[in-house]
Image (cartoon, grey):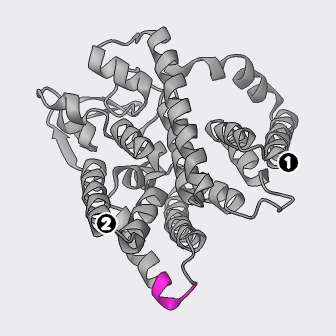
């Protein structure tokens, strides 16, 4: 519908606006008042969040994950008595399958109506897609869906999932499926368990962030830009630093936040040789992310999967 250059501008501005709304929504859900100060903080945090590799890569590749996160948060942060609660997450799942994990979260909480609404909305998107694009829909649901390696080799540094960890640390393009499934089951138990605990303590934003991160870690391929759930997690961390009664607890949360932020920064990495990148030949590679920094070094074991590490630490904490 738009010329490519104009589409880039519109999409990028849209991401900025979506980030701003996510931050406002997040702080409001934590009980902060809708004041000019809050909006000023939100603008500052949008700028700060651009340092994060998931946000930076989302903008660079024109990805959709920030928009999906906004839809899900706007939907599931509403009161449980809302009749349409679950519809937004269902729409997000219709655009990209991974938000279907929120059905599991709602079922564990016994929020039956929201879970049914989510599944019903998702099913509606499938029907609409089949009507508008029957051939493409048939191809997707019968073939494409089951070919997770179509995007790239599992052994890619940017693959920030359990399967990516097994492939990268094991130096193989065929990571053990049984190990992946077993570790994914443990990750779901840990992530959803921590989310339910957060929900019971009135920390819904933290709960939804944990579920969102769980969807990333169990995916066959989870690129850095899938991990935009670090943004609401940052909001929760800032809130805790300023509201926890215990000073030692504030210090621990602040230190963990700084460490996590450092792991997630879009650290620049340059590879000065030609190669094939994003379906085209390039003269040199300009990459971002901690996970590229460890290539060929002994410390890659500690930084090759930073987001998996953050997920486990947050969920356990």
**Where does the magenta region start and end?**
34-39
Q: Which residue is mark 1?
A: 113
Q: Sequence order check: which comes first, mark 2 or mark 1? A: 1
| Cα gap from disc 2 to disc 1, whole angstroms | 38 Å
Q: Residue most toward the front?
A: 246
In-front residue for pair 44/268: 44
Left or right of 230? Residue 254 is left
> Element under label 2?
helix
Magenta part mainly helix, strand or loop? helix
Residue 127 x/y as whole percent: 86, 36
Mark 1 burial class by Cα count in 10 Å: few <14, some 14-19, many 20+: some
Question: Residue placed at 63% from the left, 58% from the top?
Answer: 73
> Element under label 1?
helix
Question: Residue placed at 38% from the left, 76% from the top?
Answer: 44
Residue 183 x/y as whole percent: 46, 21
Q: Tell me the number on the disc at residue 250.
A: 2
Residue 154 x/y as whole percent: 41, 21
Q: Is residue 133 visible?
A: yes
């Amino acid at each position: 519908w738009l010329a490519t250059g104009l589409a880039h501008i519109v999409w990028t501005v849209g991401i900025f606006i979506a980030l701003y709304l996510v931050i406002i929504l997040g702080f409001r859900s934590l009980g902060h008042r809708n004041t000019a100060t809050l909006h000023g903080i939100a603008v500052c945090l949008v700028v700060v969040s651009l340092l994060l590799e998931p946000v930076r890569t989302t903008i660079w590749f024109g990805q959709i994950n920030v928009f999906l996160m906004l839809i899900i948060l706007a939907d599931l942060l509403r009161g449980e008595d809302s009749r349409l609660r679950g519809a937004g997450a269902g729409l997000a799942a219709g655009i990209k399958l991974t938000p279907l994990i929120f059905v599991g979260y709602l079922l564990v909480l016994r929020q039956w109506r929201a879970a049914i609404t989510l599944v019903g909305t998702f099913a509606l998107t499938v029907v609409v897609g089949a009507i508008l694009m029957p051939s493409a829909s048939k191809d997707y649901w019968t073939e494409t869906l089951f070919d997770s390696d179509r995007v790239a080799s599992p052994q890619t540094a940017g693959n920030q999932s359990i399967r990516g960890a097994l492939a990268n640390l094991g130096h193989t393009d065929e990571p053990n499926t049984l190990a992946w499934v077993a570790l994914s089951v443990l990750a779901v138990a840990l992530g959803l368990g921590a989310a339910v605990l957060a929900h019971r303590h009135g920390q819904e934003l933290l709960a939804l962030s944990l579920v969102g991160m769980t969807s990333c870690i169990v995916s066959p391929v989870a690129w850095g830009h899938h991990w935009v759930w670090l943004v609401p997690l940052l909001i929760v961390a800032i809130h805790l630093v300023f509201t926890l009664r215990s000073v030692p607890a504030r210090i621990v949360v602040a230190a963990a936040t700084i460490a996590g932020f450092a792991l997630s920064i879009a650290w620049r990495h340059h590879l000065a040789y030609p190669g094939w990148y994003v379906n085209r030949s390039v003269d040199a590679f300009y990459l971002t992310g901690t996970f590229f920094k460890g290539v060929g070094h002994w410390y890659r074991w500690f930084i090759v999967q930073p987001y998996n590490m953050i997920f486990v630490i947050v969920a356990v904490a």
